[in-house]
Image (cartoon, rainbow, N blue to C red):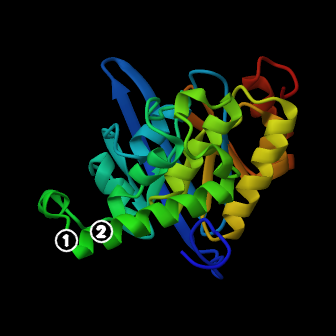
Amino acid sequence: MTGQASARGSLPSAAAPLIEARAVTKRFGGLTALTEVSLSVGVGEIYGLIGPNGAGKTTFFNCLTGLYHPEAGEIRLAGRGLTGLKPHAVTAAGVARTFQNIRLFANMTVIENVMVGRHPRTRSGVVGAILRGPGTRAEEAAIRERALALLEYVGLTPRQANLARHLAYGDQRRLEIARALATEPRLLALDEPAAGMNATETLALRALLERVRGDGVTLLLIEHDVGLVMGLCDRVGVLDYGRMIAEGPPAEVQRDPAVVAAYLGGALP
């Protein structure tokens, strides 16, 4: 990669829907975790999904990214159906995610973790890895170059040789984002990216996410830090007991009586 590091490319000029969920329903035995959940996220938008614990937010993410298959409804990315695809196929289609509980390769180095994220965009297979021809070597060099650019992008270049498990918590979160960006996503789904962060780290995260959006990646995030959501997101959807109870601009949603009631009858935290 040459020039200034970026998450993906230039900011899209259109605000057409990128991800659309239509009446998504997910059951676990006799428990209905999602009931006809619908939402649409526009190209270049930052969309926040909030709600009390157990509202179904992570279940929705798991349906979006192929970990779960919904019993009803559909999810489409730029008009292409994602429902029923396996996680690696969803990633290849252009959806990347991070997890509520950080899932790094703890005993691999920081740069190796990001290089692994390039796997969906590589061509060399087992034969190429064994024969080590010029094409394979060139691709490996390009993977490393891109990984270094992404580490610079998230501010982790000085720690590239560290094992992931030795990073501070906030740095592990940023490494997860860098690894997700390595897949060249059109949509980046973030499950509680600010969890466990202090105020300074949260401010740095907000700046990073705004930069990612500015470089052309649409963002969908679950977050319990309502202050971050209200200051960062263009629109917010609220889940409660698996149902979408409100959606709209942050200030409007924050005043919605159903949302206030969902948060234990008081003001949003």
Q: Which residue is mark 1?
A: 133
Gap between marks 1 and 2, in whole Å?
A: 6 Å
Instruction: State the image coordinates of residue 127 (x, y, percent, origin top left).
Output: 11, 61
Res 43 visible = yes
Please, what secondary structure does the residue beneath circle 2 have? Answer: helix
| Label pair 1/2, CB-CB below 8 angstroms | yes
Instruction: State the image coordinates of residue 150 (x, y, percent, origin top left).
Output: 59, 59
Q: Which residue is mark 2?
A: 137
Instruction: State the image coordinates of residue 70 (x, y, percent, origin top left).
Output: 34, 40
- The quarter holding residue 10 reads bottom right
Mark linked to residue 105: none
Seen at 26% across and 68% down, the residue is 136
Instruction: State the image coordinates of residue 158 (x, y, percent, origin top left).
Output: 67, 48
Seen at 29% across and 55% down, the residue is 89
As drawn, 183 above or below 268: below
- The quarter holding residue 217 reads bottom right
